[in-house]
């Protein structure tokens, strides 16, 4: 009888330990979900930053853009990788211009097509660059409009609520850390 109770209590103890470890994994997952950027040590005095994709939407389209750059003095450009998702295939993107606070513009330069794919929607992936100062201008804004020019049309997209939160968070914390590391 004692063995039966001992096995029962040990089983409950293992169950509770497993349950608490799952809860800890969920907590870590939530924390990670709100992370806006990642940083990687490359070499002495050089850190690489990856700003996670920011989402902009319109009725028929979804646009994501992420940024990768290093904080070294010799590197002043930022790689801007973007994807446009649509129900209809788009063969090329002519240009991407981001209007900030209705007055400042950031244009993605040297925009090149990486690939076109189809899963649930068509995706056209592009890569270009902007300057580090343009990145700071982007993240200092509060009102955004992305203009994607393709096939003689202009697709206008606006940030999701989570994107607006991410932009504010990166502007208040990320930029400061990057500037301190320079």
Image (cartoon, rainbow, N blue to C red):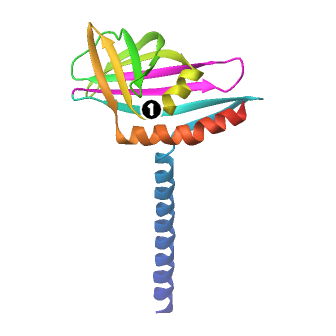
Q: Which residues are magenta?
A: 60-83
Query: Hey, which quadrant is residue 181 in on the image?
Result: top right
Residue denoted by label 1: 53
Q: What residue lies at 45% left-to-right and 11% top-to-bottom?
A: 111
Q: What residue lies at 22% left-to-right and 29% top-to-bottom?
A: 59
Q: What residue lies at 70% left-to-right and 36% top-to-bottom?
A: 180
x then y, percent, for residue 16: 48, 72
115 relative to 19, above or below: above
Q: Residue furthest bottom?
A: 1
Residue neighbourhood size for the residue with mark 1, other residues' Cα within 10 Å, grouped as few (<14), some (14–19), many (≥20): some
162 relative to 103, above or below: below
x then y, percent, for residue 53: 44, 32
102 inside magenta stretch: no
Q: Horizontally, is 14 left or right of 59 in the view? A: right
Query: Hey, which quadrant is residue 177 in on the image?
Result: top right
Q: What residue lies at 27% left-to-right and 7% top-to-bottom?
A: 151
Q: Horizontally, is 177 left or right of 81 in the view? A: right
x then y, percent, for residue 73: 72, 21
Query: Hey, which quadrant is residue 119 in on the image?
Result: top left
Q: Horizontally, is 80 left or right of 175 in the view? A: left
Tally of marks: 1
Q: What is the secondary structure assignment of the residue under circle 1?
A: strand
Q: Residue furthest front?
A: 103
């Amino acid at each position: 009888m004692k063995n039966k109770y001992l096995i029962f209590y040990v089983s409950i103890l293992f169950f509770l330990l497993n349950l608490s470890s799952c809860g800890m994994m969920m907590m870590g997952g939530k924390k990670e979900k709100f992370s806006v950027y990642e940083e990687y040590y490359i070499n002495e005095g050089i850190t690489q930053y990856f700003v996670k994709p920011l989402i902009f939407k319109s009725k028929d389209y979804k646009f994501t853009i992420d940024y990768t750059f290093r904080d070294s003095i010799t590197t002043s450009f930022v790689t801007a990788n973007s994807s446009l998702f649509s129900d209809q295939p788009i063969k090329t993107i002519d240009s991407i211009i981001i209007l900030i606070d209705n007055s400042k513009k950031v244009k993605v330069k040297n925009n090149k097509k990486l690939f076109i794919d189809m899963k649930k929607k068509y995706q056209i992936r592009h890569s270009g660059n902007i300057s580090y100062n343009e990145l700071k201008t982007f993240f200092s804004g509060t009102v955004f409009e992305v203009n994607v020019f393709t096939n003689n049309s202009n697709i206008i997209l606006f940030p999701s609520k989570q994107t607006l939160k991410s932009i504010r968070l990166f502007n208040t914390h990320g930029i400061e850390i990057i500037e301190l590391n320079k």
